[in-house]
Amino acid sequence: MSDVLEKKPTGSGNLVARLRPFTGVIALVVLCIVFGSRERTFVSPENFFNILNAMAIIGILAVGQTFPLIGGGFDLSQGAIASFSGAVVASLLSKHGQPIPVAVAAGLATGAFLGGVNGALIAKLGINPFVATLGTQIAFFGITNVYTDNQPMSLGAQADAFRQLSFGHVGQFSYASLLFLGLVVLLAVVLRLLPFGQYVYVLGGNEEAARLAGIPTDRIKISTYVLSGLLASIGGLVMIARAGQASPVAGVGYELQSLASCIVGGIALGGGVGSAWNVLLGAVTLGVVDVGLQMAVNAPNWRPVIQGLIILLAVAVDARARSRR
Amino acid sequence: MRSGETVPGCFTYSMSLLELREIQKSFHGTRVLSGVSLDLRAGEVHALVGANGAGKSTFIKILSGAYLRDAGEILLDGQPVVIHSPQDALRLGIGVIYQEFNLVPELSVAENILVGQEPVRRLGGLIPVISRGSIMAEARRHLERLGFPLRAEQPVKSLTTGEKQLVEIAKALHRNARVLVLDEPTAALSGGEIRRLFGIVAQLQERGIGIIYISHHLGEVFEISDRVTVLRDGRNVATWERGAFSETELVQAMIGRKVESGERPETSLGETVLSTNALTGSVFRNVSLEVRRGEILALTGAAGAGQTELCWALYGAVPVRSGTLHLQGKPVRWRSLREAARAGILLSPGDRKAYGIIPQLDVSTNFTFTDLTRWSGSGMLRRSRVRKSAEALIAKYGVRCTGPEQEIASLSGGNQQKVVVGRVAERNASIYLFDEPTRGVDIGAREDIYALIHALAAGGAGVIVATPDIQEALRLGDRVAVMRQGEVVYEEPIARATEPAILAAIVGGSE
């Protein structure tokens, strides 16, 4: 009936169709070539590890963002959760003299809990994810300010040991980048192998179908936000390790970057689609853009503009590719 | 073994598989079901018919667990059961295939069939792990057993409507459904797919599955049902065995009044108002048609043959590749839809969910939004005028709703369709294009829409009606044309058009 719109794929454009799954990688390669031509040292092993390390925090957040995203929502409060968790860890380390494992555990628990708050607002009260996580973003940043009394908080006596998280290395890989890569692998396992992962896809693909099939949609939804918050808090740990302190202004805008990372990597905003590979690709692409612009573009004010344009282009190409199905 | 037959030596006891007794339901004080009953035997196809708003949807939703009944009982195998949620219904073996499928488009056929029931291994006895290989294997086995021509790994979004329906049926059967409810299953299917569905229904009957079949297509009801129950205004009107009723009796029971014999008022045809010459778009080719004032051209054919795209192209909504279009003698090439509407050509779109209604807005807005200047004064929209007009329009088109402020999404499909058609019919045009104007509309309302279309033609406009329903085409058209694979392969004035010829034209030579 809708013969107008059910355009079955014709013979032409086969090359485009076959290249489509690789557009992300092609784009990445193109970017590397462009930056490499402006600044030779861009395409070097040191720089590769440098990039991986630079985007590790956003990458970790992006791993977390994947869950609500595939489930059909998204989490705008990740930056705030990272910031607050960092503050909790810092205060436990410095003010309360707790050993590192205890402080870390508290930080992670905080992230999971705040994620749970998001989940409850969205699943139980039916508030849409944009409004809910925007609201919690503001609230959580506010709580961070209260908690830190608007002052940066030091990491106390164990600062050096803790900061190894950011500065420690295994070979050329920093701990932070290894953590990111490890989490990407874990993400792949959860999405592909665990029933929970499959349910997230079903939830995002057609929530009504999930409900009717007996899948506990509320529980799954809340879980996706708990995971997003948990991973945000892990990102927060790396944040304070890198900065040497917990700052109330740290983490601002990180959730947008983590979202951009996922979407540039190929995860659809509408949900139901996406994989760990997308997260890796997207995070690396954004890292390349970020570092590349720093190295190749001298005017610092233009960098965000170009960065934004690249992201828009990536999303637009992906949207065109999708609509041509 | 079909219901009613006896096996020698066995004591057969014609117990109902499923029985719903005196089901009552009210919404916000309005009585929707006043004690409706239905019983279903194993292996039976029991049709449920009734006009839009008669209560069929509500009744089925109570059975499927989407709604909670206010009063009445549900018995399965003679035992009372409690259905408080969709999961309860699934567990009891009641499967419902709705018109809007509940499939996950991005996932494969296999994943959809097994959704919620994925086979799981326990790693180390503890960690549940989905075995994707098992999902595919199990789905393939299941599809083979059913004989469905589907590939387990195919993503559902790439399937045709008919194939998606098969996935839904396979899904229900995988959950060991003993009762299957089919809600308007043929609405979006092609002729071949309909026949395939009927074959599958027969198969299911042989397995002892009871089927409740809801349809507006009375021809189908006659063909496959063992019994028919008619509902009207939330009550049982009649239940008949196969062969015990005629079409007229059925229709009368449904609408409660005599059906008009469908006489066409005499109209004299005027000059040619629309003509195309070798018009070619991306789906249709080489279309040369003419419509005169006062004439109704009925365009029919299989889904995808190009009728919809032709209408869209005439309206200027999709580009035309070559050929000419003349409106009232002057050649036209639309640069914008506004141009088309101003020039006097209007389209009532077929897929109302996608193009016809604005679901979040109310009935009043949906009736009027295309032409708000009519209700404006000094550049400002006069809502009181809109309201009054909306009330009049609701009455004129017989839209069953609680009032102009009701959100249109909560109206039944047929009533939504009346709003879509009415909205277009209210405006002045020299050519009206109706794409599937009676989709989802029941018999009584259909007649009203036919009368409306006749009135528009009598008023001097030219009308093109695209419809997959041959009966409707024969009923409405002064001329009938058939499209197949983008070309007009048949065109005859109504006096010479015959159903076999039309069918042959639709299906084509070697089918």
Image (cartoon, grey):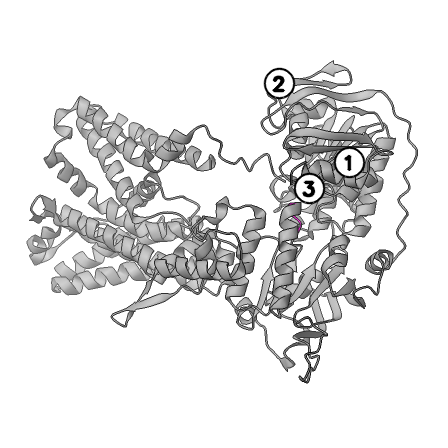
Q: State the residue position of label 3.
A: B366
Q: Secondary structure at mark 1?
A: helix
Reply yes or no: does residue A232 show up in magenta: no
Check the residue under mark 2 and report the chain it is in.
Answer: B
Q: Residue at x 32, y 54 (%)?
A: A140
Q: State the residue position of label 1.
A: B425
Locate residue A2 relative to residue B145 in the image: left or right: right
Locate residue A110 relative to residue B144 in the image: left or right: left
Which callout, 2 or 3, points at the residue further toward the start of the chain?
2
Question: Residue A244, image x and y in percent?
Answer: 13, 49
Query: Does label 3 lie on the same chain as label 2?
Result: yes
Q: Secondary structure at mark 3?
A: helix
Check the residue under mark 3 and report the chain it is in.
Answer: B
Give the Cα separation between the discs numbered 2 and 1.
30 Å
Check the residue under mark 1 and report the chain it is in.
Answer: B
Query: Which amino acid type is shown beneath numbered disc 3?
Result: Asn
Between disc 2 and disc 1, the foreground one is 2
Query: Does label 1 lie on the same chain as label 2?
Result: yes
Check residue B496 in the rendering and tell me which mark sits there, or answer none.
none
Q: State the residue position of label 2.
A: B322
Per the rendered image, the range of residues in magenta is: B186-190
> Taking the image as drawn, is residue B155 in sight?
yes
Query: Does label 3 lie on the same chain as label 1?
Result: yes
Q: Nearer the viewer, residue A230 or B94?
A: B94
Q: Please tell me whether residue B458 is drawn above or below residue A64 in the rendered image.
A: above
